[in-house]
Amino acid sequence: MRTDESYLALPEHIRAQLDHQGRQEDFAGLVGISQQAVSRLIHKGALEPGDSMGEWLLAYCERLQDQAAGRGTEDDTLPRERALLARAQRRGQDIRNQREMADYAPRAILEDVLAFVAAGMAQRLAELPAQVFAECPTLPEPARRAVEAAVGSARAEWLRATASLPAKDADGDPTADETPELLDSDDESTTAP
């Protein structure tokens, strides 16, 4: 018979029921499980045959607490299910991350493409006056100078614009050594051959 305060605070008829050696059917009705489940608990050693209903109730509650905490059970269903859930959530997050990353190209690749395109465009602009003069050999000298000046100005502006795009390092600081070298100091304007 228990004598702790919480037990003694219970009404007499409940204490009498808890002190009484119970039958499996009575305990099953008390905790809301089947008689077969009570029999399995006794067979597994979770409940001792011959103990009072109160002792069974304490043992049953301790078992429920252990199961909820994921420990001390022969049946590892809860920890296994938690592990499966965590794995599925991790896979789902990996898939979402991969889907998001498909929308973005790595910065280094973008910088390389920009440098390649900018250099190619600058080269094409440098060759343009010679192509115009080859197609129009009778073009007067003032018109030739105007074409050279316009194309040279456009090429220089293109080179300035693309060279001034901020290249940033991993810390986000602009660095001059990552900027593609597109400017030739003595090649600001193009002259006819």
Image: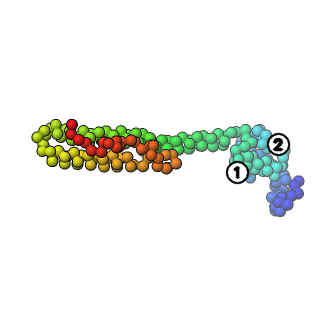
Q: How many marks?
A: 2
Q: Residue shown at 42%/49% (left/top)? A: 166
How did the renderer colour the structure?
rainbow
* Disc 2 element: loop
What is the CA distance from the residue labelled 1 to the residue labelled 2? 19 Å
User: Could you tell me which residue is drawn at 82 percent across and 49 percent down?
Assistant: 55
> Residue at coordinates 26% horizontally, 41% vertically from top-left?
126
Mark 1 and mark 2 lie on one chain; the one further toward the N terminus is 1
> For residue 186, what is the image quadrant?
top left
- Between residues 122 and 116, which one lies in front from this camera angle? 122
Relative to 26, 114 lies left or right: left
Q: Residue at x 30, y 42 (%)?
A: 187
Q: Quadrant of residue 8?
A: bottom right
Q: Is residue 178 visible?
A: yes
Whether residue 25 can be seen here: no
The residue carrying mark 2 is 49
Q: Position of residue 96 (x, y in %)?
A: 49, 44
Residue 88 at x, y percent in the picture: 56, 41
Mark 1 residue type: Gly
Q: Are marks 1 and 2 in contact (CB under 8 Å)?
A: no
| Residue of label 1 | 32
Q: Residues within 10 Å of mark 2 (few under 14, many from 20)?
A: some
**Given the current orientation, which residue lies at the most extreme left position?**
138
Crowd around label 1: few <14 · some 14–19 · many ≥20 (10 Å)? few
* Residue 71 percent location from the top left of the image: 72, 43
Q: Indicate the amino acid at tag 2.
A: Pro
